[in-house]
Image: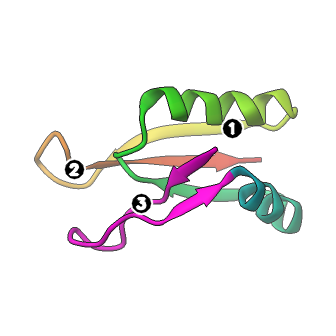
Amino acid sequence: MELKLARTSISAKPKNIDLETIEDLLKKEGQKFFYFDKDNTHKQFIAFINHFKKKGLSIYHKTVKYGLDDNDFMYEVHIL
């Protein structure tokens, strides 16, 4: 499964990251914050959350709005 990381600027395209890369980062650091783009589907996001919950990890997520438009948001995820 691949998810799109949050854009670094409004005109930039989001970069992709896969579950294996995320798991490797968690093994190295123990916990990590990730910021995901609004282009990820809700179904993908729920599957991502459930994947790490099944592994026994705690995962916290929220929507972060950064503008006045309803489409100006990203997802913040903290995995412990």
- Going by the numbered disc 2, the residue's amino acid type is Asp
Say which label, 2 or 3, has the lower sequence index.
3
Q: Which stretch appears magenta?
A: 1-18
Name which quarter of the figure residue 50 lies in: top right
Q: Which residue is labeled 3 in the image?
A: 6
11 is within the stretch colored magenta:
yes
Residue designated by label 1: 59
Residue 8 is marked as none
3D distance between C-alphas at marks 2 and 3: 11 Å
Camera-near label (1 vs 3) is 3
Seen from the viewer's position, the closer of residues 78 and 53 is: 53
Q: SS at mark 1?
A: strand
The image shows residue 27, relative to residue 63, as above or below, that is: below
Secondary element type, mark 2: loop
Kindly identify which residue carries mark 2: 72
Instruction: Name the residue at 40% across, 52% down.
Output: 37
Disc 3 marks a residue whose amino acid type is Ala
Residue 60 vs 50, above or below: the answer is below
Most common SS among magenta residues = loop
Q: Position of residue 18 (x, y in %)?
A: 66, 55
Q: What residue do we see at 72% from left, 57% from top?
A: 22
Quarter of the figure with residue 34 = bottom right
User: Decide: marks 1, 3 in contact (CB < 8 A)?
Assistant: no
Q: Is residue 54 magenta?
A: no
Amino acid of disc 1: Ile
| Residue 56 in the figure: left or right of residue 79 | right
Q: Around disc 2, counting alpha carbons within 10 Å, would you say few (fewer than 14), some (14 to 19), or many (20 or more)?
A: few
Q: Is residue 17 left or right of residue 30?
A: left
Q: Which x, y percent locates residue 23?
A: 80, 55
Q: Quadrant of the N terminus?
A: top right
Circle 1 Cα neighbour tier, 10 Å, few/some/many (<14 / 14–19 / ≥20) = some
The image's colour scheme reads rainbow
